[in-house]
Image (tube, rainbow, N blue to C red):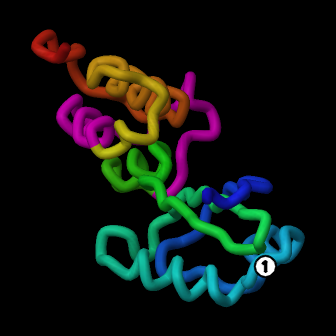
Amino acid sequence: MAKEVTGFIKLQIKGGAANPSPPVGPALGSKGLNIMDFCKQFNARTQTPECAGKVLPVVITVYSDKSFSFEVKQPPVAVQLKEAAKIQTASAEPNRKKVATITWDQVKAIAENKMPDLNCFTLKSAMSMVAGTARSMGIKVQGEFPADIK
């Protein structure tokens, strides 16, 4: 028999660095979950070099018997764009000041990586979503949109 779901908790936590302090502790404590148990499981799952230190969205499913399961998603597109462009912060005035330039190949790599978490079905639409995020951050995408992408 399936457990009854009582709620969901969405958090963004650095990989391998979950601890009971805010925002993790209060969010889990208010639902009556074992905070240290979550922290240990999350840190064990995100110890890999590609996850460690990066901000990772996590969706925690809370069940009626105070147990939980969680799904770790890919880092946000904005974080991946900053990493690709090698910048610390985005532009305060993205329409006037451009802070970096990236290529369509970098946009494609980010779109392929983030595709399971995005609300789209084709690589072309995922790439346009990533390019739109880059534009709103003040990052210029160099060249024309590749014609061979479906």
Between 119 and 131, the residue placed more toward the observer is 119
Location of residue 24 in the rendering, given as x and y in whole percent from the top left corner: 73, 74
Between 145 and 150, the residue placed more toward the observer is 150
Span colored in magenta: 88-112
- Quarter assignment of residue 34: bottom right
- Quarter assignment of residue 130: top left
Residue at 76%, 83% (x, y): give it. Answer: 21
- Quarter assignment of residue 115: top left
Residue at 30%, 45% (x, y): give it. Answer: 113
146 displayed left or right of 68: left
Give the secondary structure at mark 1: helix
Residue at the far top: name it. 147
Question: Dot 1, crowdedness within 10 Å: few (<14), some or many (≥20)?
Answer: some
Between 119 and 70, the residue placed more toward the observer is 70
Q: Which residue is mark 1?
A: 25
Quick check: is 57 in the magenta stretch?
no
On-image quarter of the N terminus: bottom right
Location of residue 9 in the rendering, given as x and y in whole percent from the top left corner: 72, 58
Location of residue 61 in the rendering, given as x and y in whole percent from the top left corner: 66, 59
Q: Could you tell me how many numbered marks the image carries? A: 1
